[in-house]
Amino acid sequence: MNYVDADLNKLAAMAGNAQDEAVVMLNLLKYRDVAEPGYGVDGLTGEQAYRIYGEKFAGLNARFGGEPIWMGKALNTIIGSEDWDIAILVAYPTRKQFVEMFKDPDYLRIAPIRGAALQDSRLVEMSQLLPKTHG
């Protein structure tokens, strides 16, 4: 089964967690060979279309704080059978900022480009366990 859009029930559950806590989102992406037409990225590859989404998303960083902290090409899945093109870790200063992004009209305007670019994806909410910070 392929997934591209956020599960609103899971997003609501996420909103029930500590809103001021920092969160890192694991993005696993599989590009379409050719982007889905009708979203302003007609004729582009999925990878090219996702780059356009990424550039537009970067313009919203001040509002949501989504800062890529690691990105790499996915190579071999050693456990499991899923096949990904790219893995990205994106840090958000607060869970609230991430959740509010899905209600923001500017984000909702660019989100369809992400969908047009991707054949499949996963987005996993994570909180840091290691390394432990001293304070």
Image (cartoon, grey):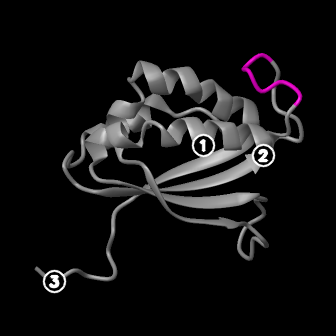
Residue 90 percent coordinates (x, y): 47, 56
Residue behind mark 2: 47
Magenta stretch bounds: 38-43
Q: Quadrant location of the C terminus?
A: bottom left
Mark 3: amino acid: His
Q: CA distance from mark 1 to mark 2?
A: 10 Å
Q: CA distance from mark 2 to mark 3?
A: 40 Å
Residue 117 percent coordinates (x, y): 74, 36
Q: Residue furthest left?
A: 135
Residue behind mark 1: 54
Q: Is residue 86 magenta?
A: no
The quarter holding residue 119 reads top right
Mark 2: amino acid: Glu
Which one is nearer the viewer's eye here, 133 or 8? 133
| Horizontal side of residue 127 vs 85, given as left or right | left
- Residue 1 seen in render: no
Of circles 3 and 1, the one toward us is: 1
Q: CA distance from mark 3 to mark 1?
A: 34 Å
Which one is nearer the viewer's eye here, 80 or 19? 19
- Contact between labelled residues 3 and 2, with CB atoms less than 8 Å apart: no
Residue 15 percent coordinates (x, y): 29, 38
Q: Which mark is residue 134?
A: 3
Q: Residues within 10 Å of mark 1 (few under 14, many from 20)?
A: some
Which one is nearer the viewer's eye here, 56 or 122? 56
In the image, is residue 111 above or below residue 93? above
Q: What residue is at 43 percent from the left and 18 percent from the top?
A: 105
Q: Quadrant location of the N terminus?
A: top right
Residue 108 percent coordinates (x, y): 50, 22
In the image, is residue 88 above or below residue 100? below
Q: Which mark is residue 64?
A: none
Which one is nearer the viewer's eye here, 31 or 78? 31
